[in-house]
Image (cartoon, rainbow, N blue to C red):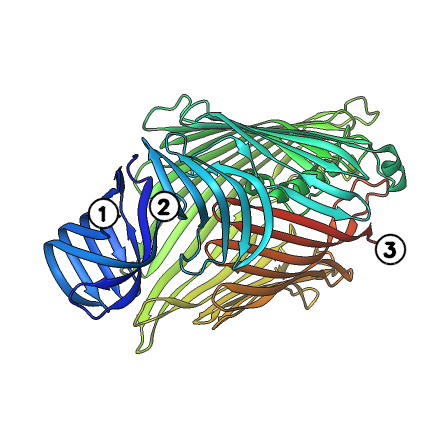
Amino acid sequence: MRKYFLFFIFLTTFILSANEDIKQEQFQVVAKHLDYQDDIITATGDVIMFSPTYYITAQKIVYNKNKNQVDLYDNVNILKDNKNLSISDYSFMEFDVSSFSDVVFLLYDNDLWIESSSMSSKGDDVFLKESYMSSCDCNNPDWSIKFSSGAHYDKYSWLQTFNNRLYIKNIPVLYFPYFAFYTNTDRHSGFLMPTIGYSSKEGLQYIQPYYYAPTDDFDLEFVPQYRAKRGNGLYTYLRYADSPDSMLKMHYGHFKEKKAFQEEHELKNQDHYGFTLNYERSNIFASKENQDGFYANLDFLRDIEYKTLEERSNNSNSSYTSEYNVNSYPSKTESNINYFYKTNDDYFGTYLRYYKDTSKESNDATIQKLPVLHYHKFSTPLIAQNFLYSMDANFTNYHRTKGLKERETTVSMPFFYGTSLFDDYINISLQEEIFFAYLDYDENDLTQKFDNGQYFQFRHSATVSTNLIKAYDLFIHTMNLGTTLYLPNNATTKGDLYNISNENTLLADYPITQAKKNLSFWLSQSFYHRDFATLFLNHRIKQSILYDGDGNSKLGNLENEIYFYHQFGSISNRLFYNHEDNKLIQSSTTLRLVYDNYFLNAGHYWTQLTPHSNKLDTESISYELGFGFWKNYKLSYRENYNIHDKILNKKEYRLIVDRGCWYLNFSIADELVSSSRLDNKPLRQDVIYFFVELRPIGGIDYEYTMKDKPNNE
């Protein structure tokens, strides 16, 4: 029998007599190897025999079923009530059986055990009668499946059973005539857990994934879905590892609406389809000293309904759920192809970006980046080790079918010198940057003509900083503070540059960020517990003084960030204060609390539109609170609320039970989901989700949509 695969346990109710008081004990025995010879069962390899009173270890046991005797060999250690009773190389035990002897198998890879009143074997295959199986506690399992007959084929790791009855505790709840599954955790072809659902809008829903794995480097998954009132669809997923350093993932889906459903719910299209290709590969051309990699993610879809239907089909816990599952999709998608080559001194990359907005009838005016070329020279000593230079160069081809196009080249070359004074108390760094940009316009049949733009500038900066540390009786304090003066020369410009030499809004898609003089100050400090050297407080503050072209100054936004860590969790806040408006313009706060079995996770985000903030009025809050009880149970409530627009994005009540041998996730949710309606408005749904898994044999996912309507209703 294959090593480490099938553990042997024999479980019996008997009267134990070994020079001890007669006492009824229930024993289990676990070992690595099992051998049958008529009525003699031999278990070898790290044998463990245990009961509520006894814990016995040995390297070998021989069990005589007729005589109810056990011989224990090699490194025998017998403990009773956690006290050592005997240590020897051999022991003998004889049992007076009060009822009958059962044989139990424990499948090593997944902790499933099978108890059988009658068992026979042929080679490595085992045949069972009047048995039951579970992965819960042997004495009182939460769930079990009783069956009249079955067989385990070791070569294929395949278990099949007949006349099955599912029990919850001692209550029968389901009958199924045939059941079969693989007993190890290797990849095997077969059906995955289904999703069953119902809604008044779509009727009965049934989604049944099938997984096909013909080879170790290739697999497929088919996810057909049936929606009685709405239509039918099929999503197909492929994975292929063409080398040890690469992985190809592809998926295609198509769902066809019933015409009556499309018209009633004002959907743009009757057919929803899409295709995604994802490919990653490393070590293509690079030697051992260097690195390179290729990445492609191509995402094409007709409308957002394709993604929404896919996400709901992935609730079936398919093997791809974690990779593709989302709660809602934005209407914009991005496809990209990247390649990079990196050495210790240089980095080269080329990227292609393609954007699509499914809410638009046409994307001819959408700007694409086809391609981007990027070169970076890492900091390299020029004359001395503290005199460095680097370079960053980019070329971007901004392309679209309709509208102004542009090809943009930028080059930045900074020179850096750093030193320290006063025994490293003061750090000084000086930087001189040469910056150049060239914008080559293509009017693309526009009547308006533009001259190609050029922008050239020297940018100087000087930084003075210090790092301090001091230990106090109760804590350690570290502090970094400094100032940077950024002083660019007046730029030399030529041609049409938006907001510099030309205010035409057609150029607004291709702005050049003008570097301006500024002086910034910052302070960053941390506090650590002295005894444990753990961080409990971190604070950072930064203030800039901005100068315009005429030398006039104003205060930039004040940035303040603080993190506080304590034994029950953490709290953090980041805010921005605008001096011109004398108002806070942005704040984000997070809170994490855990006390005993109670927990709270919360986040708040807020921005304010003011004359100088460049922000919009927004405010939202998200939080989850709950508590655990009975060790394996957790009850929680989650909510995501748009305070500014007074829109509830999602609220959910959730119960999670994780008993090890089974798992339950039950939730009731009110949520917004993306839709491809003619008005592009999302839908609001009231949904009940129910997922239960009997580990390791599988489970079922159920979804019931109580309400499904446009958000404005």
Element at label 1: strand
> Along the polypeptide, which appears first: circle 1 or circle 3?
1
Q: Of the two numbered discs 2 and 3 on the same chain, state the one appearing first in sequence.
A: 2
Label disc, if present, on residue 105 of the rendered structure: 2
Element assignment for label 3: loop
Picture quadrant where residue 426 is located: bottom left
Q: In front: 535, or 625?
A: 625
Vertical position of residue 363 compared to residue 52: above or below:
above
Q: Is residue 613 above or below residue 230?
A: below
Q: CA distance from mark 1 to mark 2?
A: 18 Å
Q: Which residue is mark 1?
A: 64
In the picture, measured across the screen, residue 124 lies left or right of residue 576, that is left
Rounded to the nearest angstrom, the CA distance separating label 2 from label 3 is: 58 Å
Q: Position of residue 643 (x, y in %)?
A: 73, 63
Asked if the residue at tag 2 contacts the one at tag 1, i.e. Cβ–Cβ closer than 8 Å, the answer is: no
Please, what is the three-letter code of the amino acid marked with disc 1?
Asn
Of the pair 75 and 404, the residue shown nearer to us: 75
Residue drawn at x 21%, y 71% as measured from the top left: 21
- Mark 2 lies on a secondary structure that is strand
Residue depth check, mark 2 versus mark 3: number of the one nearer the observer: 2
User: Which residue is at the far left?
Assistant: 89
Q: Is residue 108 left or right of residue 148?
A: left
Q: Which mark is residue 10?
A: none
- Residue 630 location, x and y as percent? 50, 69
Which callout, 1 or 3, points to the residue nearer the camera? 1
Dot 1 crowding, Cα within 10 Å, few <14, some 14–19, many 20+: some
**Residue under pointer 3:** 713
Q: Residue 646: x percent and y percent?
A: 78, 62
Asked if 325 appears above or below 630 in the picture, the reply is: above
Answer yes or no: is residue 295 visible: no
